[in-house]
């Protein structure tokens, strides 16, 4: 069972080559492709990815502007050639070698496999106390208010594998940054497994975290709560 790795990007030129090289080492014997969905990065991210496509199974989709993480993931899934899609960031905070563990777990028949910071063996490196509190608090709220999210210890993870059909669900909302939470909420009977990993510090480029992202998460969470009460 080959996999497609979907990587949304914006200004990640310096990270693309080590990411692609790492994925080749981790997934080369399993069969894989990488779909880069770039939001017209001014730093030349797409051009670097196209250069690498001459040596690796990489395809590049360029969108006209920044259109959001969730919609980038859904666009990448639409372009995927395989039934299992791995979603990860380009900034190397999601270790490429863990993608192999996600792929192997998906082969066992799980619908969703989450790379979790909060299951036994997982963790986070080099976060300040405020970010730890914010992340733990957001995770607690998601698990408390969205019951299907309780099947994972890390429902806000941006690093996961899922059956392609779940990402192509026409009811999936292309809003916000926590698309895994959306998928869990819409698929309460899906088979879910957590895989521990350690979230690494960013070594190149700038973090995308902002107050806008925090507000988008709160809005998404409130919407999912309202929707769950209508069911």
Image (cartoon, helix red, strand yellow):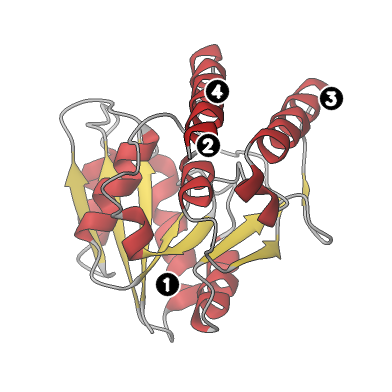
Q: Earlier in the sequence, mark 4 or mark 3?
A: 3
Q: Residue at 43% of width from left, 86% of height from top?
A: 29
For the N terminus, which image quadrant? Answer: bottom left
Q: Earlier in the sequence, mark 1 or mark 2?
A: 1
Q: Residue at 20% of width from left, 58% of height from top?
A: 79
Q: Nearer the viewer, mark 1 or mark 3?
A: 3
Q: Give the residue pinned by disc 2.
A: 228
Q: Residue 155: horizontal and vertical position, in percent?
A: 62, 46
CB within 8 Å, label 4 to label 2? no
CB within 8 Å, label 1 to label 4? no
Q: Earlier in the sequence, mark 1 or mark 3?
A: 1
Q: Earlier in the sequence, mark 4 or mark 2?
A: 4
Local crowd size for mark 2, using a 10 Å CA cut-off: few (<14), some (14–19), many (≥20): some
Q: Residue at 35% of width from left, 54% of height from top?
A: 167
CB within 8 Å, label 3 to label 2? no
The residues tagged by marks 4 and 3 sit, at their Cα atoms, a distance apart of: 25 Å
The residues tagged by marks 3 and 2 sit, at their Cα atoms, a distance apart of: 32 Å
Q: Say which element carries label 1.
A: helix
Q: Residue at 30% of width from left, 53% of height from top?
A: 169
Q: Nearer the viewer, mark 3 or mark 2?
A: 2
The residues tagged by marks 1 and 3 sit, at their Cα atoms, a distance apart of: 35 Å
Q: Give the residue pinned by disc 4.
A: 222
Q: Give the residue pinned by disc 1.
A: 24
Q: Give the residue pinned by disc 3.
A: 129
Answer with left or right where residue 176 lies relative to residue 214: left
């Amino acid at each position: 069972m080959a996999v497609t790795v979907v990587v949304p990007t914006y200004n990640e030129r310096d990270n693309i080559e080590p990411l692609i090289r790492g994925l080749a080492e981790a997934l080369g014997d399993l069969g894989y492709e990488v779909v880069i969905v770039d939001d017209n990065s001014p730093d030349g991210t797409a051009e670097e990815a196209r250069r690498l496509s001459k040596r690796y199974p990489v395809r590049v989709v360029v969108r006209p502007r920044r259109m959001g993480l969730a919609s980038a993931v859904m666009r990448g899934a639409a372009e995927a050639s395989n039934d299992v899609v791995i979603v990860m960031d380009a900034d190397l905070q999601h270790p490429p070698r863990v993608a192999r563990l996600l792929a192997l777990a998906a082969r066992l028949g799980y619908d969703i496999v989450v790379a979790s910071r909060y299951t036994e063996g997982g963790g986070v490196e080099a976060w300040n106390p405020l970010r730890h509190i914010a992340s733990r608090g957001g995770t607690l709220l998601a698990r408390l208010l969205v019951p299907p999210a309780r099947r994972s210890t890390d429902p806000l993870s941006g690093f996961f594998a899922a059956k392609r059909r779940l990402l192509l669900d026409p009811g999936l909302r292309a809003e916000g940054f926590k698309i895994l939470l959306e998928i869990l909420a819409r698929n309460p009977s899906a088979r879910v497994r957590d895989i521990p990993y350690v979230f690494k510090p960013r070594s190149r480029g700038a973090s995308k975290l902002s107050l806008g992202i925090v507000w988008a998460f709160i809005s998404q969470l409130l919407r999912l709560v309202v929707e769950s009460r209508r069911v």
